Image: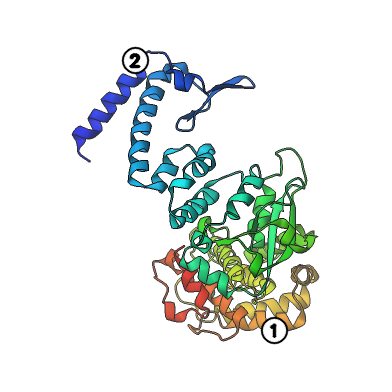
Amino acid sequence: MTTATISEQHAKLKELMERREPLCDELARRLEKRGDWTVLHHPLIVSVPYAEEMNAAYNDGLRQKKAALNKAVADGNWSHVMMLHERAWRLNALIEYAPLMSDEAFWEEVAYVWCDTETPYVNKSVWVRLFKVKRPGRHGMMDEDEQEMLARMPREITVYRGHDGRSQNGLSWTLCPSKARWFAGRFINLDRRRPIVTKGVVGRDKVIALFLRRDEFEIVCEARHVRDKTEVDDAVAIHSSVSKLYQYAVRRFRLNKLRTDHGPRHWSQVMRNVERIHAARPDTNLAIGRAFAVLHDCCREDEYGDPEHGERAAKWIVQMVLEEPQFSKALDAIGMTNDLFDKLLTAIAGHNRGEVSTDATIGMCWDADRMDLPRVGIVPDAKLFSLPETKGLLWR
Ligand SMILES: [Fe+2]
Ligand SMILES: [Fe+2]
């Protein structure tokens, strides 16, 4: 783009902001009163609040968007058609233009609009009908990675949903407990309702789609197909026990916490990686992964070279279990049994030897650590990932 073009745009914007004119009839019909505010809510122009001084800009915006929309419809460019609509209107646009789309384009746009919507629960019955439309190629909602991951999932899939008690029967579930906790946490302080994580099991054949977009590990399925639903009341307890382990690890850590690449910031990233890998590989153990994330580097004593730090951490953990009952209790609370504890020590002692593991859980721990190598400017070597799933998650 040339400087002249940018200046021209600035001049046009200035002129629009200074010009005073009435709102065109089409937009004026879309003014709504919401509480103390007046809002403009047209499928192509939304403004909250509406400001009369912006009329010229609204009118001009509508003219331009309508021209672009006509062209996109004529070209069959449906993703552009959807994007030209304001987010709150994209579901309406999808329904309006669906008869003109090919089956392939239809399912792609269903996926796009679904992943783009912020309130799927509000239009749940419309979405259920859309997902059940008898048009071939529904699997085309998912990209190749998503299709492959769903095909690899077990026949019975454990899913989670974070909610506030009023929307437990939504269509959007996740493979990732931390994501469900995050969604549940959104309700804290909003209207003082209790955040809840529901856990259940859904048959793979009942899954409408799996989406890896937005890093939500989303499973779309009807709540009536999710069996054995229980409220995960240990979600908060696990969170506080992991925090306790984290506090012990921070106390043990000798490097400068603000400057190091191996401290708490890295541990948090490894934790996120563990949960993402676990979502893709449910046969891995999350208790080991969580403990690994917060403890594996806490005994590092040299920022650049310290080949003993894995072994040192494993010995320190054993010592802590023997001497510090609160540390042991925190490990118990996240689900660490004796068998698992041995595996945790193996994972931690060996994490910096540059090896791969045939054990899925140890592989998950080491992969989660290596996934964070870009923080020190190193591109992870795909050959050193123990699990094939990790490579697909790295740059997503
Ligand atoms: Fe390390
Ligand atoms: Fe590490």
Depth order, front residue of 346/84: 84
> At x 53% / y 78%, what residue is drawn?
387
Q: How far across and down, in percent of the image, does residue 52 sit?
A: 46, 16
Asked if residue 273 shows in the view, the reply is yes
> At x 62% / y 45%, what residue is drawn?
126
> At x 25% / y 33%, what residue is drawn?
6
Choose top left, top right, bottom left or bottom right for residue 200: bottom right
Mark 1, secondary structure of its residue: helix
Earlier in the chain: of badge 1 and badge 2, it is 2
Going by the numbered disc 2, the residue's amino acid type is Arg
- The quarter of the rendered structure image containing the N terminus is top left
The residue to which callout 2 is attached is 19
Horizontal side, residue 93 vs residue 347: left or right: left
Choose top left, top right, bottom left or bottom right for residue 59: top left
Badge 1, how many Cα within 10 Å: few under 14, some, many 20+? Answer: some
Going by the numbered disc 1, the residue's amino acid type is Asp
Q: How far across and down, in percent of the image, does residue 386 sit?
A: 52, 81
The disc placed on residue 252 is none
> At x 56% / y 79%, what residue is drawn?
363
Mark 2, secondary structure of its residue: loop
Badge 2, how many Cα within 10 Å: few under 14, some, many 20+? Answer: few
The residue to which callout 1 is attached is 342
Depth order, front residue of 391/33: 33
